[in-house]
Image: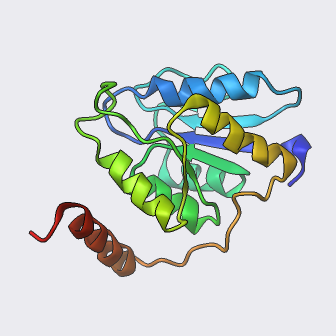
Amino acid sequence: MTLTDLAVVVSVGTDHHRFDRLVEWVDHWIAAQDRDIRCVAQVGTSKHSITGTSHALMSPIALSSAIAGAAAVVCHGGPGTIMDARRAGLNPIVVPRSARMGEHVDDHQERFARWMATHHELVVATEEAELHRLLDRVLVDPETYRRAPGNDDVADVTRRLGELVEGLLGPA
């Protein structure tokens, strides 16, 4: 991948709560660049991207295809999207939804993202400037967030997710 075909995929997931903040932060970063950056955004009920191609929802195949061709995936803190990026060989940049901002019902995405980040499974951005710094790294090295493609199977992911939930909430 070269800087001339740099692509960023944005996914807010499928929750009905709006997540305009994530789309706006990526739009601000792309608008400030002096080169073309392709952006594909799955925005759900959130505002559409002004710098990229937006889709309310994308089929799993279309989203996986877009992720496979991206230098960076910027997404909400949902496990499904995170695992999709990891399976495609990318550590995603995660901006967790916030309950206090009306983006979700609670802050489980913040807890999940912090835990995953401590295990080097993703990178977290909680402020716009932090997200911009993380995306700036892709301009210098488009392979920054590449990793070996995951081969996590459903049973392994389910087991690991159960361990995570138990670690966060305690035994049932």
Q: Residue at point 54% right, 78% down?
A: 151
Q: Nearer the viewer, residue 47 or 160?
A: 160
Q: Residue at point 88% right, 30% down?
A: 35
Q: Residue at point 29% right, 48% down?
A: 108
Q: Nearer the viewer, residue 9 or 101?
A: 101
- Residue 23 is situated, as x and y percent measured from the top left of the image, at 55, 28
Q: Nearer the viewer, residue 93 or 128?
A: 128
- Residue 158 is situated, as x and y percent measured from the top left of the image, at 31, 73
State which quarter of the image contains the N terminus. Answer: bottom right
Establish if 17 lies above or below 91.
Answer: above
Image quadrant where residue 132 sits: top right
Q: Nearer the viewer, residue 19 or 84?
A: 19
> In the shown orientation, is residue 145 left or right of residue 79?
right
State which quarter of the image contains the C terminus. Answer: bottom left
- Residue 122 is situated, as x and y percent measured from the top left of the image, at 54, 58
Q: Residue at point 32% right, 29% down?
A: 17
> In the shown orientation, is residue 10 left or right of residue 60?
right
Please tell me how many numbered marks the rendered image carries.
0
| Residue situated furthest left in the rendering | 172
Establish if 146 lies above or below 4.
Answer: below
